[in-house]
Image (cartoon, rainbow, N blue to C red):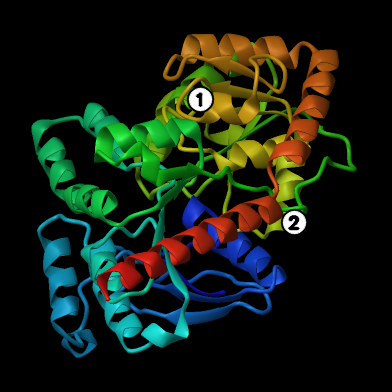
């Protein structure tokens, strides 16, 4: 099959979109398919055999100058103008403007592809692609409605809440597109339920295909560092529960010699940095970001235990990666996390999300039980090997493609 894989941003080292694009495309090529990735900035890292077509935006949120003001010479068309004006009014334009740009590109190349795979863009342009006759399938990792609710609950004042409502304005569009785009892939039964409830999608249109773990994620060959706890967060946002972990960690620090490694890039002057200063734990917390997979594996495998304190996850790929590294876990009983780790206590101790007291006590108990950590790590590794394979993801996804292509061809034949 000739596949167009569409992703409005594909950050290589954190967040699910870029990781999903890279590993899925690689495994599809191994199966003999042709894959061309269409992406806006930040562009993905891709493996040999996968081609990239850049679909540049104005890149308004790039580091180190997010919410930048473009030069007049950077504006190419009305889509660029829409993107800039939406940002200026506190909205998030990228899903809509990327979908417009990529729909125009594919309109000129409709004969080049057997199917287009929308990686959670859910912009109106995706419906233009479908109307053009190219079979379309969509991945929704989880509906961003959860991020919106948690952000609004954490907002300190009315002004911030109003700003957040404007930022999440794209969700109305995503709901409409989700209901009209056809077949949908998602990564967990938890996400499937949430897509049905929040976007109003027919459950018969959804197929669950869990994510995979790259083979580079393996148990460590070096001794784990005594007292080291690791946690990952793809973004400095309330939904990741980092503040809950920091509060629990600060109390534990008064009782024992421990160090926290956060795999994330904190927002300059953001909530995480401020809370670390308020709790007086800056010298006991370090950050890791922008590292290669091999470096990430080393970090994950160096800890005595890992914590996933998220308030919600549609899948939690870092959880599966930590399991593959045989790192014992304390994780929130939230979203799809219980689905990923399996029965409570076997590969992870599950705790109520948002409760630093219970989180801290559970971490302390596991730190004090090295034999249980060893058993838990071995069980986690076995579960990851058994359940989370990118090859299996690609095989199931290719079968879903074939189904959509057949359905589209059948629909075309009925209208002739």
Asked if one can make out residue 278 in the rendered structure from this viewpoint, the answer is yes
Depth check, mark 1 against mark 2: the one in front is 2
Q: Quadrant of the N terminus?
A: bottom right
Residue 75 locus on image (x, y percent): 19, 85
- SS state under label 1: helix
In this view, 360 is above or below 227: above
Instruction: Please give the label number shown on residue 245.
Output: 1
Residue 159 locus on image (x, y percent): 9, 38
In this view, 13 is above or below 189: below
Looking at the image, residue 68 sits to the left or right of residue 169; the answer is right
Cα separation, mark 1 vs mark 2, equals 25 Å
Q: Earlier in the sequence, mark 1 or mark 2?
A: 1
Instruction: Please give the label number shown on residue 294.
Output: 2
- In which image quadrant can residue 293 be found? bottom right
Residue 134 locus on image (x, y percent): 37, 74
Looking at the image, residue 262 sits to the left or right of residue 141; the answer is right
Closer to the camera, 394 or 322? 394
Q: Residue at x 61, y 77 (%)?
A: 50
- SS state under label 2: helix
Q: Quadrant of the C terminus?
A: bottom left
Q: Residue at x 79, y 25 (%)?
A: 379
Closer to the camera, 96 or 330? 96
Asked if one can make out residue 63 in the rendered structure from this viewpoint, the answer is no
Q: Residues within 10 Å of mark 1 (few under 14, many from 20)?
A: many
Looking at the image, residue 216 sits to the left or right of residue 42; the answer is right
In this view, 409 is above or below 109: above
Residue 200 locus on image (x, y percent): 24, 38
Q: Residue at x 35, y 81 (%)?
A: 106
């Amino acid at each position: 099959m000739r596949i167009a894989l569409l992703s409005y941003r594909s950050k290589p080292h954190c967040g699910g979109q870029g990781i999903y694009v890279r590993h899925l495309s690689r495994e599809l090529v191994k199966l003999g398919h042709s894959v061309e990735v269409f992406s806006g900035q930040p562009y993905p890292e891709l493996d040999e055999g996968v081609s990239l077509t850049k679909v540049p935006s104005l890149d308004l949120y790039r580091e180190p100058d997010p919410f930048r003001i473009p030069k007049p010479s950077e504006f190419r068309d009305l889509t660029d103008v829409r993107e800039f004006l939406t940002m200026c009014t506190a909205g998030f334009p990228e899903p809509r403007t990327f979908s417009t740009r990529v729909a125009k590109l594919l309109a000129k190349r409709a004969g080049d592809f057997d199917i287009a795979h929308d990686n959670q863009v859910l912009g109106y342009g995706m419906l233009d692609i479908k109307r053009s006759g190219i079979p379309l399938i969509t991945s929704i990792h989880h509906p961003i409605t959860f991020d919106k609710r948690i952000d609004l609950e954490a907002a300190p004042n009315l002004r911030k809440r109003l700003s957040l409502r404007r930022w999440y304005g794209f969700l109305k569009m995503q709901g409409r597109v989700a209901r009209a785009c056809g077949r949908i892939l998602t990564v967990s039964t938890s996400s499937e339920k949430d897509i049905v409830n929040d976007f109003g999608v027919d459950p018969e249109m959804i197929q669950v295909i869990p994510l995979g773990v790259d083979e580079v994620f393996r148990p460590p060959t070096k001794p784990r560092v005594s007292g080291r706890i690791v946690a990952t967060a793809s973004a400095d946002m309330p939904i990741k529960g980092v503040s809950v972990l920091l509060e629990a960690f600060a109390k534990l620090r008064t009782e024992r010699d421990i160090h926290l490694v956060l795999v994330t890039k904190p927002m300059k002057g953001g909530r995480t940095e401020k809370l670390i200063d308020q709790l007086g734990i800056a010298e006991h917390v370090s950050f890791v970001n922008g590292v290669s997979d091999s470096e990430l594996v080393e970090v994950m495998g160096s800890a005595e235990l890992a914590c996933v304190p998220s308030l919600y996850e549609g899948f939690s790929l870092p959880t599966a990666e930590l399991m593959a590294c045989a790192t014992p876990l304390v994780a929130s009983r939230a979203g799809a996390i219980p689905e990923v780790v399996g029965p409570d206590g076997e590969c992870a101790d599950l705790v109520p999300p948002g409760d630093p007291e219970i989180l801290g006590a559970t971490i302390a108990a596991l730190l004090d039980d090295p034999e249980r950590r060893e058993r838990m790590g071995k069980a986690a590794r076995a579960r990851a090997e058994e359940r989370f394979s990118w090859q299996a993801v690609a095989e199931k996804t290719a079968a879903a493609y074939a189904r959509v292509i057949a359905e589209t061809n059948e629909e075309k034949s009925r209208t002739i």
